[in-house]
Amino acid sequence: MNTVIREDTVTKVEKILQDFIEESGATYALITDMGGNPLFTAGEEDFDVDTLAALSAANYATTKEIANLIKEDNFSLLFHRGNNENVHFAKITQDILMIVLFKPFLSLGLLRLKINSLQQKIVSIIGN
Amino acid sequence: MAIVNLKDKTIQIKIVYYGPGRSGKTTNLEFIHNKLQQNRNQQISNLVSIDTKGDRTLFFDFFPVSLGKINGFDLKLKLYTTPGQVKYEATRRLVLKGVDGLVFVADSLTSRQDANLESFENLKSNLLYHKQSLSDVKLIFQWNKRDIDEKMIPLSPIEEMERLLNSELKVQSFPASATSGMNVLKTVNYISKETVKSVIEKTILNKHKMGN
């Protein structure tokens, strides 16, 4: 099944992502499908977005397989801490993943709360 | 699953190179990447390889490439390989998620015909895992390593490989040599063209739209 994303859908979701970046202080937000195709982005980047999407989808899928292997449904937190940038991964729907880059001085807990509320807004636009 | 973005006017398509271990999937991608770097003025993204210390693919090789415009849409192709070794079944399956086009890289060595068959059966069952079948994707075969001197290492005749893998499907196939580059670009051009054509037909006929 191929997916056609309407113009107004892109505008609405990217506005939500942009607002989220401004409120939370995150650096960059990317929504990708589980096949590794970038769908929506906001924020500034100096890397290849397609590669980030491909690697993130693979990373998420691998972690999920590890969870299945040890009889867990999934891990509730998928997060990498760096010296200059952190990465947080969150499942938005069964087929969609959100990746947020943020500076280490930002609170992970607060960011996760914001991502949770964001998730509902995004689902209301794109559906399940 | 191809993604058509009506705001950015982009079409994203995923092509996966599949086949048994050491059949030449990574070599195909390396050749294409090198050629694009040499021939094009535009910036080409890096080839990402997740491999073992022994240079065997652990997860996948990947790079995105822009193909220009069609009907005002920017075409972006994502090229992936899968790990061929049997033990990497879990990661191989994951790479197939959302695939639009497949190149099955078969090894021409006589001694590897069982491995070709096994890998092809494995492809079908892994597509099934993603609720897909061969009829849902574009598929072509590449009979790789045709440059090997048959006096040194016996090769299977192309007719024999066609009979083994392609007798029912009867899809396009190319004899090739990924190391010398023979028919490598022809293979990628053909699968890209056919996949794009099929995606455009499907998105026009079957408008599955994201958004309420």
Image: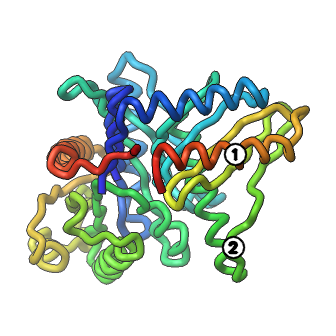
The image quadrant of residue B138 is bottom left
Residue behind mark 2: A67
Residue A7, percent from left and from top: 37, 30
Q: What residue appears at the point 24 percent right and 60 percent down from the top-left corner?
A: B137
- Residue at the limit of the structure toward the top, as seen here: B41
Q: Amino acid at mark 2?
A: Ala
Q: What residue appears at the point 38 percent right and 24 percent down from the top-left corner?
A: B38
Residue B15, percent from left and from top: 34, 51
Image: B138 above or below A80: below
Q: What residue appears at the point 76 percent right and 27 percent down from the top-left corner?
A: A23
How many marks on residues?
Answer: 2
Chain letter of the residue beneath label 1 in the structure image: A
On residue A117, the disc is 1
**N-terminal of the two: label 2 or label 1?**
2
Image: B4 above or below A56: above
Chain letter of the residue beneath label 2 in the structure image: A
At mark 1, the secondary structure is helix
Q: What residue appears at the point 27 percent right and 28 percent down from the top-left corner?
A: B73
For this rendering, which residue is in front, B191 or A87? A87
Image: A78 above or below B164: above
Question: Residues at badges 2 and 1 in contact (C-beta under 8 Å)?
Answer: no
Q: Is residue A76 visible?
A: yes
Task: Say whether mark 1 and mark 2 are on the same chain.
Answer: yes
